[in-house]
Amino acid sequence: MQETPEEKPPVFSSWSVWYWLVAGVLAALIVFFYFFTKNYS
Amino acid sequence: MSFLDWIVLSCTLIFIILYGVWKSRGQKDLDSYFLGNRSMPWYIILLSIIGTQASAITFLSAPGQAYTDGMRFVQYYFGLPLAMIVICIFFVPIFHRLKVITAYEYLEQRFDLKTRTLTSFLFLLQRALSTGISIYAPSIILSSLLGWNIYYTNLFMGGLLIIYTMYGGTKAVSYTQSLQLAIIFIGMFLAGWVVVHLLPEDIGFSEALHVSGKMGKLNVIVTDFDWNDRYNIWSGVIGGFFLALSYFGTDQSQVGRYLTAKTLTESRMGLLMNGLVKVPMQFLIMLIGALVFVFYLYFRAPINFNQGLLNKVHNSAYAPEMQVLEQRYDSLSLQKAGYVKAMAAAMKSEDQNAVESTKLALKDAETASDTVRAHAGRLIQKVDPAAETNDTNYIFLHFVVDNLPKGMVGLLIAIIFLASWGSIAAALNSLASTTMVDIYQRMIRPNGTDAENLRASKIWTLIWGIFSIAVAQFASGLGSLIEAVNILGSLFYGTILGIFVTAFSMKFVKGSAIFWGALIAEGLVIFIYLNDYVSFLWLNPIGCGLVMIFAGLCQLLMNIRGGKPGLKGA
């Protein structure tokens, strides 16, 4: 294993952007599921 | 199954085994056997993580659960993406920096040997029991399809697995999981496509969703809060977060997957991608179950989806009684088909009054059907008192076997095998690695050569495989298998997570305090579960919190008894 303490993430400039992306997608999914449930119930 | 199905099934399984064996050549030591020389790219990590979590249970039980209880089980996964973020920030960098083989090695460096051993023991206990259930899940397929005795089927399934896992090591596990998942996704997509196309011509995808939703099966989000409700958004986000944090952050079957990555970045990317795809994936799998429900509103469903049990009743003195129930059930099925057609027509003409009236009539007929099904269940238990009448795990299987074209049935059955093999292989691998690294090599034989260690690792894989098969023999009375596995995990995960969280965040707590704190917390978690105070997902945050509280208190007491000034003395 290569020891690279400050490895840069792919695509984005920092890992924080990746973390926000994952949290944002989850929030969007929950909103989508909420309206999905309301629409079809 | 047709001859073509058997050919497809056999060829797929043989191909996977040979592929795994071919990919796992050249193992020399523990690092290559358990971590594949830390050489995996992120996409293999991702597929391996998903393949480890998504067992046959996921593909069998989840659609069945949507059929019976609706889609609210999806909420159980809402905490997972958040857990992936926390693990990437706190857990993975430490594991990579210390170059550990198991997560529990870290605990000896942070606390002491007894804490490492206790945590390893808790992991081994729950993982070995869960693996037994995971062996049982595909065995019921063979048992149901071929009429084989479930005990011999467990032996056959587990036996094949042990040979494959013993030889393969982690590299074989990871590479076969990738291939397995590719086949699984293709198969599930085809199953979803087929169920929509098998519906009557006047019912499209949208109408099927509306019917399913009107019958309460598309209840993805439940906002009502209830401590004893298993699946609502609160227990999903909070309880699911702690369960996922513990499972992915401290369960060796998952930690062992992302420690095979060649860099820290590859580990993180695999975990974050899992956070992105897992919830939509589970949603789609359960949507298939909700659509299968609509399918069986139009077409006759059996009174119990476990055909083997039904046959038993038909061959007993209770056969006439069952026939009466089946006639009543079939009559209600015809009524439901009529109502659902009327409802679909009302929806097309946008007649809301007609939609509501047919919905009520349909729900009444569904309730009456459920009552008849419950009667049938009691009749089954009269014939076989040990029988499990909950048929959740058989619903999707019954649909596949009865309705998919020749060849595809074999493929779907192969998929269930592959999914199962992927997760069980990873579990056996993690059981062996924890036993080898944290117990055998640490306390029994610390100076073994590479060849001796490799041989011992294979023997431990064999031992745990045999133990898991033994557990599988007792799994038949556990109801929905996916819930049984999650409940079992929740009993121990909270405590294990609490130990790790304390290690990261409470620097003043030392070895003895965390050891006793964890023991007290585990006892309380089991007490809470046995008394049914809360739904099982809550056991994860409760267990974690209890460990932190009792470890802190124990440390405080120890400091006072040792004459040290409060927390500062630790």
Image: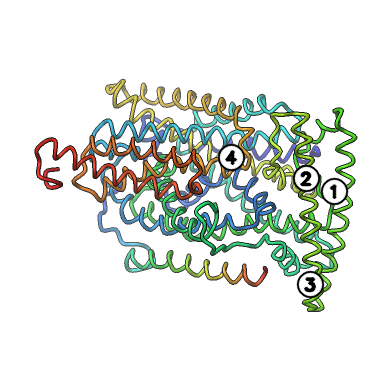
Q: Which mark is residue B329?
A: 1
Q: Are marks 1 and 4 on the same chain?
A: yes
Label 1 is found on which chain of the structure? Answer: B
**Quadrant of image for the C terminus of chain B:** top left
Q: Are marks 1 and 4 in contact (CB under 8 Å)?
A: no
Query: Disc 3 marks which amino acid?
Result: Val
Label 4 is found on which chain of the structure? Answer: B
Q: Are marks 2 and 3 in contact (CB under 8 Å)?
A: no
In three-dimensional space, the C-alpha distance between marks 1 and 2, rounded to whole angstroms, equals 8 Å
Q: Which mark is residue B482?
A: none
Query: Disc 1 marks which amino acid?
Result: Tyr
Label 2 is found on which chain of the structure? Answer: B
Q: Are marks 3 and 1 on the same chain?
A: yes
In three-dimensional space, the C-alpha distance between marks 3 and 4, rounded to whole angstroms, equals 42 Å
Q: Are marks 3 and 4 on the same chain?
A: yes
Mark 1 surroundings within 10 Å by alpha-carbon count, few (fewer than 14), some (14 through 19), many (20 or more):
many
In three-dimensional space, the C-alpha distance between marks 2 and 4, rounded to whole angstroms, equals 30 Å
- N-terminal of the pair, mark 3 or mark 1, is 1
- The residue at the far bottom in this view is B350
Q: Is residue B116 visible?
A: yes
Q: Are marks 1 and 2 in contact (CB under 8 Å)?
A: yes
Q: Nearer the viewer, mark 1 or mark 4?
A: 1
- N-terminal of the pair, mark 1 or mark 4, is 1
Q: Circle 4 is placed at which residue position?
A: B420
Q: Are marks 1 and 2 on the same chain?
A: yes
B228 displayed left or right of B407: left
In the figure, residue B73 lies in which quadrant?
A: bottom right
Q: Nearer the viewer, mark 2 or mark 4?
A: 2
Q: Position of residue B238 (x, y in %)?
A: 44, 57
In three-dimensional space, the C-alpha distance between marks 2 and 3, rounded to whole angstroms, equals 26 Å
**Helix, strand or loop for disc 1:** helix
